[in-house]
Image: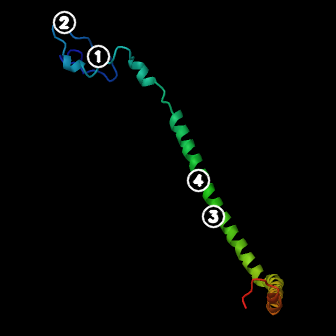
Amino acid sequence: MSDTSEFSVPEPFAPKPPPRNDESPDVSAEAPSEKPAGVDEGATSQQPVNLALPVLAALAAGFALGYAFSRYEEILLRQSKLDKFLDYANDWVREHGSKLTDPIREGIESTGSTVGRALRDVGSSAARLDQLNPFRQR
């Protein structure tokens, strides 16, 4: 385009040309391009992006997920070890159960027979002891 044209074409990223003296400035055209007084145009485009927060959030999320997964695997492993131990203990009790229960059964039987004998002896001697009772009914 030539400079002799009445309408100028702004170049990209070029500063806006000042209004001519014979023209009144268009307020609506300037409104979108106005920046606050404290903001520099060059500083906004060159400001570095702060990635520390997303990186820390991703690290924390990864750590939390890894910890949860390891706890889950540990629970599964512990449960499988407990199941194996219970199966082993059940088999051992089936195999060696009689060795454990026979002495207990013999002890209960001998105690029962001893108590039975004692009760019979007391019952047979009750008639003799009843004669010594001063409160007996005749």
The residue beneath circle 2 is: 21
Q: Mark 3 or mark 2, which is nearer the start of the sequence? A: 2
Measuring 83% from the left and 87% from the top, which residue is drawn there?
A: 114
- In primary-sequence order, the first of circles 4 and 1 is 1
66 over 91 or under it: above or below: above
Question: For the residues marked 4 and 1, what is the alpha-carbon distance in whole angstroms?
Answer: 58 Å
**Residue nearest the observer in this picture, 108 or 66:** 108
Q: Which residue type carries mark 2?
A: Asn
Query: In the image, is residue 51 above or below residue 2?
Result: below
Query: Which residue is the site of mark 4?
Result: 68
Tell me the kind of residue under disc 4: Ala
Q: Which residue is drawn at 20% across and 16% down?
A: 27
* In-front residue for pair 7/4: 7
User: Could you say which quadrant of the image residue 135 lies in?
Assistant: bottom right
Q: Do the residues labelled 2 and 4 touch (CB within 8 Å)?
A: no
Residue at label 3? 76
Amino acid on which the number 3 mark rests in the picture: Leu
The Cα–Cα distance between marks 3 and 4, rounded to whole angstroms, is 12 Å
The x and y percentages for residue 124 are: 81, 93
**In the displayed structure image, the side of residue 132 where residue 40 appears, left or right:** left
Residue placed at 81% from the left, 89% from the top? Answer: 131
Question: Disc 2 versus disc 4: distance between alpha carbons?
Answer: 72 Å
Side of 82 where 121 appears, left or right? right
Q: Mark 1 points at which residue?
A: 16
Residue 32 image-quadrant placement: top left
Is the Cβ of the residue at disc 3 closer than 8 Å to that at disc 4? no
Coordinates of residue 112 in the picture (x, y in percent): 79, 87
